[in-house]
Amino acid sequence: MNEMRAGVLSGVGRLEIIEVTRPQISSPQEVLLRIETIGICGSDLHYFRTGRIGDQVVDFPFIIGHEAVAVVKEVGSNKGDLRPGDWVVIDPALSCGRCDQCRAGRSHTCRQLRFLGCPGQRAGCLQDYLVLPRNNCFKINEEESTLGILVEPIAIAIYAHHLAEGVRNKKVIVLGGGPLGLVVAYISRQKGCQWLGVTDKVDARLEGARKVGADWIGNPLDQNIIKEVESINPEQVDIIFECCGQQEALDQAEILLKPGGKLVIIGIPEADRIWFNPHLLRRKEIEIINVRRQNNCIPGAIQFLQSHASSLRFLITHRYSLNEIQEAFEVASNYKDGVIKAVIDL
């Protein structure tokens, strides 16, 4: 068969299933994957809601999605350690391996980077089959495959903690308790933070924050976040992970961080501009750290998931078939039905 199904973003807020040509291996380094499960990421929801992230504008129709678990169907002549039947998670970032960034160990900021499901770069994973370089595929056990889509957000969270240079004995807040924010919070607790707070506007996600070990939770829709945190921590907090891409959260972070504190920005704003109070940043000497996805953290993320699967299983709250992609994205985009993480099983 030369045809396969693909879920395409055909307009803002609209998804369709179409038939497209099945890809074929064209290089010794490539493998053909049968996509089994796809996670709906926050960046996918940006494209669904607005058709863009900054200057990355969707040219409809377009296949989105980049968190995937797959089975190897065919391998090129340079097999490496992959064989047909192996279960894998994928690194959705395809780097050139030759530019100054790649040579410096920064393949995640490659000058020629092509990211799956990113407009102008490469079509995403929301399709039956996908061809990728062998180096972008990482083996997992079949019994772990149902949680495998958590590997990429775990990798991002691990990288964010690396950039933060340690949370042990520190007071930490995670602003935004979506799937990634909850993983960040969980890792902070595992790494020995002294105090952990999590905020979100969805009560189900705040309940999830309790499950990952938060000492305090706050909903900005009905609580004064700044007043409550400062009543608990009058000397303010050491590190804030911003995981929701909201100006309101950035404003809170400036005030809640102590002098010398670190603001680690993971969330992607839908707005093209955000702003800071330069006087607060300067007087308190706040360090701002931007997180660009992850950098060589997938093997560690797989190991982390293997050790903590039972504690993180609750993050996947909704599962859909490919025929239900419109409903899946509407539920995830509108935070309906207590959704934390929605996945699509192909």
Image: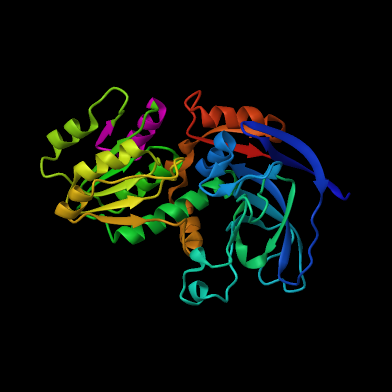
Quick one: which residue is furthest to the left in this view?
234
Rendered image coloring scheme: rainbow
Q: Residue at x 40, y 42 (%)?
A: 245
- Count the labels in the image: 0
- Look at the picture and state if 72 lies above or below 1: below
Residue 215 is inside the magenta segment: yes
Q: Residue at x 57, y 63 (%)?
A: 113
Quick one: which residue is furthest to the right in this view?
1
Q: Position of residue 304 (x, y in %)?
A: 44, 55
- Look at the picture and state if 241 lies above or below 206: below
Q: Position of residue 255 (x, y in %)?
A: 20, 42
Q: Which residues are magenta?
A: 203-217
Main SS class of the magenta portion in the image: helix
Q: Position of residue 285 (x, y in %)?
A: 18, 56
Q: Position of residue 183 (x, y in %)?
A: 40, 45
Residue 39 is inside the magenta segment: no
